[in-house]
Image (tube, coloured by chain):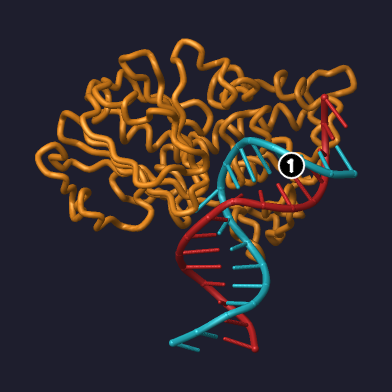
Chain colours: A orange, B red, C cyan
Amino acid sequence: MPELPEVETIRRGLAPALEGATIAQLEIRRPDLRYPFPERFTGRLMGQRIESVTRRAKYLLLALSGGETLIIHLGMSGRLSLRKGQADEVKTVGEYIYNTGALPQHDHVFIGLSNGASVVYNDPRRFGFMLLAESGSLADHKAFAGLGVEPLSPGLTSNYLAAKAAGKSADMKSFLLDQRIVGGLGNIYVAEALFRSGISPRRTAGTLARANGSPSNRAEKLVPMIKDVLEDAIAAGGSSLRDYRHTDGNEGRFQEAFAVYGREGQPCVRPGCGGTVKRLVQAQRSTFYCGDCQR
DNA sequence: AAAAGCCCCTGGACGC
DNA sequence: TGCGTCCAGGGGCTTT
């Protein structure tokens, strides 16, 4: 589900209510998501003040006053909802009652805050997960060691991309999906960035570098298009296809602006192109592209 | 080392 | 109405 723009939208929705608040209530409704919850999960979170809500790639990071960070990944279908209920008065939030078992399906984690707000984690497929790690050594954590550059940071340059691509025989699609190269791109935004760049997803990634290792013209084009499409998607509040919603339950709007994703058989939107959007499977995922103007 | 394949899980859309 | 099949914003682990 959520790629970088969706996670960033959720981060922006949560931060005002969570930063400075203390975790007063925590309920987990099952022993695991993708992985078992961390040891003594409740004890390590209760009473902690949330110092900051940040993001790295597709990970949400809640820095806690005690020196640990709660790491949340939403997988494919994870949602975080922010509710304004008085969670510490009664265990009733909105229409839901949290201490009677009358829970909506797949509401797996409930976090009540000292300021009366609450956060519910819902994830039908349970590909998401939560981890706890020492804040001071996050960069060494296995989830982040080896993670590629943040695409909206100055670190993503054509030189960086060319250096990573040099000598690689993988196709462009697989290369950009690889979180060790760029952190945060997923199936939608790889497709849209390649379309905006006029690059075929089937092209060999190594062609982003010239023989001497310097960036090719395509690399020079691709880097700003990656940044543009992510910025546009964040501005639109992300893309809602099935599960994704803002923390307030509203949908994102960027799906209305897709040029190729999910548009198989429809005409290319590039003026004068006249091509048709095609679908193929790469790395076990659907790829959408225009065979005429992406080369 | 890099690349390809398989798996985890639930639910919705579709064909018969 | 009720199957069976395919597909889905992710990533980790195993095999080649």
Q: Which residue is mark 1?
A: A199
For the view shown, which residue lies furthest in the left direction? Answer: A89
Label total for image? 1
Q: Residues within 10 Å of mark 1 (few under 14, many from 20)?
A: many
- Location of residue A102 in the rendering, given as x and y in whole percent from the top left corner: 24, 58
Q: Is residue A146 visible?
A: yes
Compared with A188, A58 (above or below) is above
Q: Residue at x 16, y 45 (%)?
A: A91
- Which sits in the foreground, A74 or A213? A74
Which image quadrant: the C terminus of chain A? top right
Query: In the figure, A89 relative to A262: above or below?
Result: above
Rendered image quadrant of residue A39? top left
Dot 1 falls on a residue whose secondary structure is loop
Image position of A266 (left or right of A35): right
Answer with left or right where residue A161 lies relative to residue A48.
right
The structure residue drawn at horizontal position 68% and vertical position 34%, both measured from the top left corner, is A178
Residue at x 65%, y 20% (from the top left corner) = A157
Q: Quadrant of residue A147?
A: top right
Residue found at the very far top of the displayed protein: A136
* Residue A86 pos. (x, y %): 13, 40
Relative height, residue A121 to residue A155 (above, below): below
Image coordinates of residue A257 in percent, x first then y, are 50, 51
Q: Amino acid at mark 1?
A: Ile
Left/right of residue A18 with respect to residue A57 in the rendered view = left
Q: Is residue A287 visible to us here?
A: no
* Mark 1 chain: A
Where in the figure is residue A224, as x and y percent of width and height? 61, 29
Give the residue drawn at x 88%, y 17%: A212
A119 or A204: which is nearer to us? A119
